């Protein structure tokens, strides 16, 4: 499994005097999902198209299974390489089945229209063969059409599949589904998939290896975890997003806390507190003075239990002994506390007793890379 399906060695591509791929070297291990990620115009599509020779390199060598692509017959080369693009380009006047068998029909005639295989592929990409094979593309949703595009790329059973932003035009939910299915599919099929995106979240989710590109060069290649932990430079750091740097454990509570939690004076009556909570759509309020001195936290339950006692104020029902965090504490230490905190809220309070923010379970999920949270959970905290 360790051989490389694709290798680039010092590959450059220029248009006139414009260099778009600049002395690029990379390797794509067989059976992996490798994601090329980078900003628009950085050369992702160009790199990909040099693999199946839709674009010829100006210098250097591109090898597929060890062989220089320029020494291979183009048609033969492309038989080994499926291709899926964003505008899948299904032919509107052909049925789904005919679209899937398009390429084999071109080369083998009617014999290429292998119904058993078409049905298998439809099922493989999550479409019920009986209900979809005879429909026309316009009758399918965008996500379903994209599944057909994947089925079509698999029809010739190529060992390598190139996918250029295949899911970017889809709504977020369909997109998540297709990402999940691609991962599942490849656990079954073990194809080498080269996948282009400019969405880092997508890359982190589906990739075995990520290749980050900028200005026609490879900036970094590694597993998602390696890239999260050790971004090569500021560009990668920026691209991953400041927020995800939690993974190298350098973040503190201050980096992730909400700065304007809902807070009320301890002398507020309970009806007023409830009204504020409803208006702000929160389930807990922090109790603090005007000058910021922290006193406690109260949630709807604490308040409703004693709501009928009209003379009470927040001071009487708040919890003053609930856990708090100091802003300078490392996030790694804070996470277990937040996980276990009553109602998942932990006020952030300075050494001097001042309320400066709030960390909630929900805000942590927003901020942290999921792999990191999973790691913390898996290690038993
Ligand atoms: N035929 C061409 N002639 C001249 N320049 C080109 C040509 N094709 C691409 N380029 C340039 O090469 C660079 C890389 O293009 P490429 O399509 O590979 O980028 P990309 O990373 O896929 O971007 P996107 O995310 O927008 O799809 C761009 O600056 C583009 O303008
Ligand atoms: Mg592109």
Image (cartoon, rainbow, N blue to C red):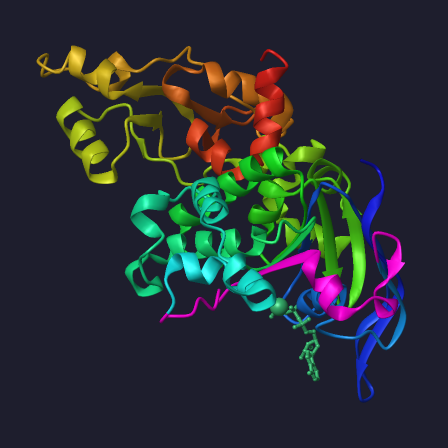
Picture quadrant where residue 119 is located:
top left
Q: Residue 128: percent from the left, percent from the top?
A: 35, 42
The answer to whether residue 243 is seen in the rendering is: yes
Residue depicted at 27% across the width and 17% down the height:
315
Q: Is residue 162 magenta?
A: no
Q: Is residue 72 magenta?
A: yes
Residue depicted at 85% across the width and 72% down the height:
12
* Front-most of residues 304 and 43: 43
Q: Is residue 26 left or right of residue 258?
A: right
Residue depicted at 32% across the width and 45% down the height:
130
Label total for image: 0
**In the figure, 178 relative to 239: above or below?**
above
Residue depicted at 82% across the width and 74% down the height:
57
Q: Residue 36: percent from the left, percent from the top?
A: 69, 55
The segment highlighted magenta reads 64-93
Q: Is residue 124 left or right of residue 301?
A: right
The answer to whether residue 169 is seen in the rendering is: no
Q: Residue 231: percent from the left, percent from the top?
A: 76, 46
**In the figure, 341 relative to 89: above or below?**
above
Picture quadrant where residue 259 is located:
top left
């Amino acid at each position: 499994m360790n051989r490389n399906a694709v290798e680039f060695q010092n590959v450059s591509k220029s248009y006139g005097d414009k260099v778009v791929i600049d002395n690029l070297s990379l390797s794509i291990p067989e059976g992996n999902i490798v994601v090329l990620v980078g900003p628009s115009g950085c050369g992702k599509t160009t790199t990909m198209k040099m693999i199946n020779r839709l674009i010829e390199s100006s210098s250097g060598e591109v090898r597929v299974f060890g062989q220089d692509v320029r020494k291979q017959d183009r048609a033969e080369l492309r038989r080994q390489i499926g291709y899926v693009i964003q505008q899948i380009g299904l032919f509107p006047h052909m049925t789904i089945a005919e679209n899937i068998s398009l390429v084999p029909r071109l080369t083998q005639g009617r014999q290429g229209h292998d119904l058993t295989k078409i049905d298998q592929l439809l099922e493989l990409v999550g479409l019920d063969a009986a209900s979809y094979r005879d429909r026309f593309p316009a009758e399918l949703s965008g996500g379903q059409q994209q599944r057909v595009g994947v089925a079509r790329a698999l029809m010739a059973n190529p060992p390598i599949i190139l996918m250029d932003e295949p899911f970017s035009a889809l709504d977020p939910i369909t997109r998540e589904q297709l990402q999940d299915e691609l991962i599942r599919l490849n656990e079954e099929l073990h194809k080498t998939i080269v996948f282009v995106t400019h969405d880092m979240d997508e890359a982190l989710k589906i990739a075995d290896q990520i290749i980050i590109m900028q200005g026609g060069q490879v900036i970094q290649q590694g597993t998602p975890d390696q890239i999260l932990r050790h971004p090569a430079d500021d560009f990668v750091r920026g691209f991953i997003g400041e927020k995800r740097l939690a993974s190298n454990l350098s973040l503190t509570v201050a980096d992730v806390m909400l700065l304007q939690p809902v807070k009320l004076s301890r002398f507020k009556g309970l009806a007023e507190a409830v009204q504020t909570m409803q208006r702000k759509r929160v389930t807990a309020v922090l109790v603090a003075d005007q000058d910021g001195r922290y006193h406690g936290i109260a949630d709807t339950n604490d308040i409703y239990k004693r709501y009928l006692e009209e003379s009470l104020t927040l001071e009487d029902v708040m919890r003053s002994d609930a856990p708090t965090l100091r802003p300078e504490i490392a996030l790694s230490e804070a996470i277990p506390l937040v996980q276990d905190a009553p109602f998942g809220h932990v006020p952030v309070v300075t050494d001097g007793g001042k309320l400066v923010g709030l960390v909630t379970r929900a805000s942590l999920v927003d901020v942290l890379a999921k792999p990191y949270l999973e790691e913390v959970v898996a290690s038993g905290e």
